[in-house]
Image (cartoon, grey):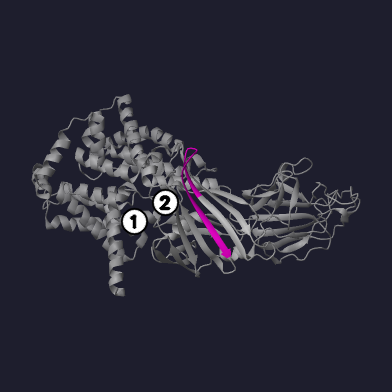
Amino acid sequence: MNPGLKDIKTQFREFSTGILNSYSQVFFSDKKLFAGLLLLVTFIDSFAGICGLFSVLVTNIVSYWFGFDKNQINKGMYGFNSLLVGLGLGIYFSPGWLLFFILFIAALLTLFISVSLEGIIGKYALPYLSISFILSFWIVSLATREFTALGISERGIYSLNEMYILGGKGLVQLYQWWNSIYLPLSVKTYFISLGAIFFQFNVLSGILIAIGLLYYSRIAFSLSILGFYSAYLFYLLIGANITELSYSYIGFNFILTSIAIGGFFIIPSRLSYLWTIILMPMVVILVVSLNRLFINFGLPIYSLPFNVVVLLFLYILKFRVVAKDSLAEVLIQQNSPEKNLYSFRNYLSRFKQKTPISLQLPFYGEWQVSQAHNGEHTHKGLWQHAWDFMIQDEDQKIYENDGDFLEDYYCYGKAVVAPADGYVDDLIDSVPDNVIGKVDIKNNWGNTIVIRHTDHLYTKLSHLVPESFTVKKGDKVVAGQVVGKCGNSGRSPYPHLHFQIQATPFIGSPTIDYPIGHYLLKEDNSEKLLSFSRPKLNDIVSNISVTPLLQKAFNLIPGKMFSWETDNGVEKTKASWEIKTNAYNQTYIECLDTKSQAFFEEDGALLFFTYFKGNKSSLLYYFYLAAYKIQTGYYQDLELHDQYPLNHIFRKKILFLQDFFAPFFLFLRAEFTVRYSKIDNNLSPGLIILNSSSKRLIGKRLFKETKFEFLIDNSGIQSFKIYIGENLINATCSN
């Protein structure tokens, strides 16, 4: 294909996406089918639909011309406010060239206000919602009172004629049937309130939007009903005139507020639903009071109460000293309450304790925790978050012979290593070792090294052998580098290593509660991987010993290419992958054929995938499932377990019911397991086999299982097998 033609097609596709998203963004969505339905709804009043589309086109074209952020344009972030302005003006004024000129100016004004608000309140990580629509519409409405050349629309009288032109007699009959059908007042008001968001004051519009909302998000749909009826019941409780609500159809304020607070800007949960109910009376009060205020100026309040309550609520959450998982703000917006929820729950289960700097244990081999946090003898008060480590033998003894001499202790003289990259900030190296049973109270910490990892993260290693340090103050160290030897100096009756983490650089600094990144816990002669956890008393722990063969196979560095040939017994296909990084410094594998992407993180000892988007029939998707979490150190029969986000595993049909209940409980589960099955030689391996599985469960019942096998040799991943029921897909790598 001609490169120039390809670029034009890409630009047109992006531009079209920006137009469609301007419609769905009103409901915080980016689903194209939903957007298409909303576009159709706006054309129930055909001229209003044309005006809305014209305003969006003007806004997006000018946005591109100015060079604004393409991602924002394509998401519809600038277009949706102009859409509402265009629809409103198209409803109230008669067609004519002057109106389109006013629409052009109004679209520009709305864009300028949107971009300005993005800069003003965006720095507080707050959305500008539909404020620019309200301000722009008010300004234009007030001004047009002096524009005598603009005629007020009388199209409502002839709406059926317009509908006949659009869809013939069938559309007219459908429209009349829906609007004449008996519905309880509250249900009718709910539907018309939905339609009123797009200036369509009829039941049919509301029903179509409700169907689209249900398709877009079950959580958003249920919240729209919860918010509307919470407000509706409050109207009845306070004895307010409910006919005013049904006349102005201002109920969309309750619908939009409930979706925004209950499920879009806040992770859906029991607490977010509760706050949706609590906030509805506040929205009602604002609707009533602001209506009385602005009626003096002849201005409708439109979505002003929604904007005020949502922005106030999101703003006050910024002042929380302790953020709660039960009422958590959405940090990575996926334009879907369900996706936000499933990703957040998956993050909590996998990375809740994840730290910016991953610390390793400060030694080689297996050591036992002789004193943990809140220890029996020391590690009290401000210094409670610390560990003491020793080495014991198979008989659980910490020394040989009678233990009368320092050299009898297994840990004495053993290498002490840096827990992470950093700089030596302080060091004491002149305190003599104690004889067994004696302590040096004057020099409490003994020979000590303090390493600075960041400005507020330091590690301290104490009771080392005098003059055993291999570094000096100011030296740079890397994780795993030997810095000294375990000794018995200071307040230490027996050789051991004291390890603590602190926020300040002083040798006597208080400790902080900070987990160890990844380590192995020995249980019943087998190992268990723990991540971002804290060793407990008597735990036998060790760092992950990396196996070069595994490390090479899963060394996913940017620029690396993979070429695959797959055989499912019927046909052979090929796939090409490339490791890439994006503007946010995220690493991912991209399938060059399907454009699917699998995002991952690795820290040398562990590889774990975090997100997938694209074709779920692609080889890359199965690789994502199979290698979801891989430790690059081989331990025979070691099993690692993890959980996938539900929306990455289950089909939409199965998720449909779960979505309704997801904020309260999950009855679906998606589990990952990998087992280290075979190694041909522990010292110099040339072949390793890993077996993994992806399980889908409904409650405790296994619904579906897909099994995988990796064959790894000196060339890397030699082959990758996928077992789907009775079917086998064999993928051979020739990278």
Q: Residues within 10 Å of mark 1 (few under 14, many from 20)?
A: many
- Inspect the image, locate mark 1, and give the three-letter code of the amino acid beneath it: Lys
Q: Residues within 10 Å of mark 2 (few under 14, many from 20)?
A: few
Left or right: residue 581 versus residue 500 is: left
Q: Residue at x 82, y 54 (%)?
A: 410
Residue 399 in view: yes
Left or right: residue 376 versus residue 590 is: right
Image: magenta residue range: 694-712
Label for residue 333?
2
User: Is residue 732 depicted above or below 246 in this figure?
Assistant: below
Give how far apart the Cα atoms at labels 1 and 2 are.
12 Å
Label for residue 75?
1
- Residue 204 screen position, x and y as percent: 20, 40
Which mark sits nearer the N-terminus, 1 or 2?
A: 1
**Residue 424 highlighted magenta (yes or no):** no
Which of the pair 463/235 is nearer the observer?
A: 463
**Residue 710 highlighted magenta (yes or no):** yes
Which of the pair 644/462 is nearer the observer?
A: 644
Q: Which residue is drawn at 57% across and 48% down?
A: 641
- Inspect the image, locate mark 2, and give the three-letter code of the amino acid beneath it: Gln
Q: Could you tell me which secondary element the residue under label 2 belongs to?
A: loop
Q: Residue at x 27, y 72 (%)?
A: 5
Q: Could you tell me which secondary element the residue under label 1 belongs to?
A: loop
Which of the pair 589/242 is nearer the observer?
A: 589
- Residue 615 screen position, x and y as percent: 39, 57
Left or right: residue 375 versus residue 250 is: right
